[in-house]
């Protein structure tokens, strides 16, 4: 390189702001952001472990979604906080067509029809034990019986108006049977974004607090979520979900797994999304609170890194904050 270009000084193009803009290889815009929102009954309540994040009642939720739409955010992701009384061992509230999730979808679609709504498919916000599926006597999550419940859950969400069904449960074979059910119901344009490479991670703690499953979870999710040691397995997970009909795939958590984002993108050339999860948000906020970093800079740098790794977009609790910073 240096022999062929003797006069090359890499600093030259960095010497002014206009030139750095001109040479930027990656662009972050509000259109790259998906905003996860927590929904609740009763009143708006802050999530203790996620400073700045609130569980919203439906009227407030609709206002937040309108704000997101006005800032150019294309999609919101919904997560319900289900009252204890509606939780059960089989999580059947998940497929009640009038559950909080379905009411939230309908409220948004009615008030803000020009934003995409992504809905999580998994049983953990509805089970009394906090697992994503139905467990046997030993507490082991059963794949096939859970997958059937997930199909019912996806069906009621699509019927309520969900645009993107996002199974986050990690059961084998669920994408194919959900796709078949959506087709049978006539939801040909409802997309599936598969949480394909979802790791058994220590970064989900604050989320479990937000949806109210924190104290409930017995054991861990290592029998169905991926081992952080593995990367080839992530490619097998993605291959299966794509073969079964996923329109896009997700890698989760985010920053510690950018290698997976890059590998999936290189291998499959499909839309890949990354989830900067609750623990990652909490780490940034803790750094800011400790005076150890600048929030705006940390947020924009981390989000840009996802784009550079090959992500089409990022689910982030900082979406609205970032979108404000990114207004033209
Ligand atoms: C549930 C689900 C989880 C998250 C999204 N969907 C938690 C888990 O698997 O325990 C985590 C998101 C976050 O931490 O922000 N299936």
Image (spheres, rainbow, N blue to C red):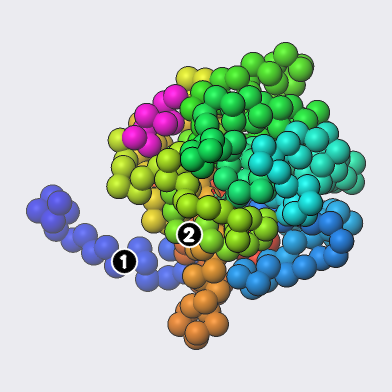
Locate residue 218, reporting x and y percent: 53, 53
Q: Residues within 10 Å of mark 2 (few under 14, many from 20)?
A: many
Q: Could you say which quadrant of the image residue 179 lies in?
A: top right
Horizontal side of 319 relative to 24 (left or right) equals right
Q: Which residue is mark 2?
A: 203
**Residue 310, visible in the rendered structure:** no
Horizontal side of 3 relative to 155 (left or right) equals left
Q: Is 152 or 159 nearer to us in this picture? A: 152
Q: 172 above or below 90?
A: above
Q: Is residue 235 part of the magenta span, yes or no?
A: yes
**Identity of the residue drawn at 61% across and 56% down:** 216
Locate residue 109, reporting x and y percent: 84, 40
Magenta residues span 233-240
The residues bearing labels 1 and 2 have C-alpha atoms spaced at a distance of: 40 Å
Earlier in the chain: of badge 1 and badge 2, it is 1
Q: Is residue 241 part of the magenta span, yes or no?
A: no
Residue 12 marker: 1
């Amino acid at each position: 390189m240096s022999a062929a270009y003797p006069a090359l000084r890499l600093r030259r193009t960095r010497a002014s702001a206009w030139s750095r803009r001109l040479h930027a290889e990656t662009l972050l815009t509000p259109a790259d952001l998906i905003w996860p929102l927590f929904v609740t009954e009763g009143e708006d309540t802050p999530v203790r472990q996620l400073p700045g994040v609130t569980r919203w009642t439906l009227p407030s939720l609709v206002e937040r979604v309108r704000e997101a739409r006005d800032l150019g955010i294309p999609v919101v992701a919904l997560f319900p906080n289900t009252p204890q009384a509606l939780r059960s061992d089989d999580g059947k509230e998940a497929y009640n067509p009038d559950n909080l999730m379905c009411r939230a979808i309908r409220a948004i679609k009615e008030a803000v029809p020009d934003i995409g709504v992504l809905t999580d498919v998994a049983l953990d916000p509805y089970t009394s034990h906090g697992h994503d599926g139905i467990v046997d006597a030993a507490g082991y999550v059963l794949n096939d019986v859970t997958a059937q419940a997930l199909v019912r859950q996806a069906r009621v969400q699509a019927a309520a108006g969900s645009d993107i069904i996002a199974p986050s449960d990690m059961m084998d074979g669920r994408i194919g049977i959900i796709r078949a059910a959506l087709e049978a119901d006539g939801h040909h344009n409802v997309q599936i974004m598969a949480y394909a490479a979802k790791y058994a991670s220590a970064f989900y703690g604050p989320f479990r607090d937000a949806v109210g499953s924190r104290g409930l979870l017995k054991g861990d999710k290592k029998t169905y979520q991926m081992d952080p040691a593995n990367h080839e397995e992530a490619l097998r997970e993605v291959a299966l979900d794509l073969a079964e009909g996923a329109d896009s795939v997700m890698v989760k958590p985010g920053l510690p797994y950018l290698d997976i984002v890059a590998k999936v993108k290189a291998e499959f050339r499909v839309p890949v999304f990354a989830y900067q999860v609750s623990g990652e948000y909490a780490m940034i906020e803790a750094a800011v609170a400790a005076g150890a970093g600048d929030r705006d800079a940390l947020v924009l740098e981390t989000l840009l890194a996802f784009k550079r790794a090959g992500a089409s977009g990022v689910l982030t609790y900082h979406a609205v904050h970032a979108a404000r910073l990114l207004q033209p």
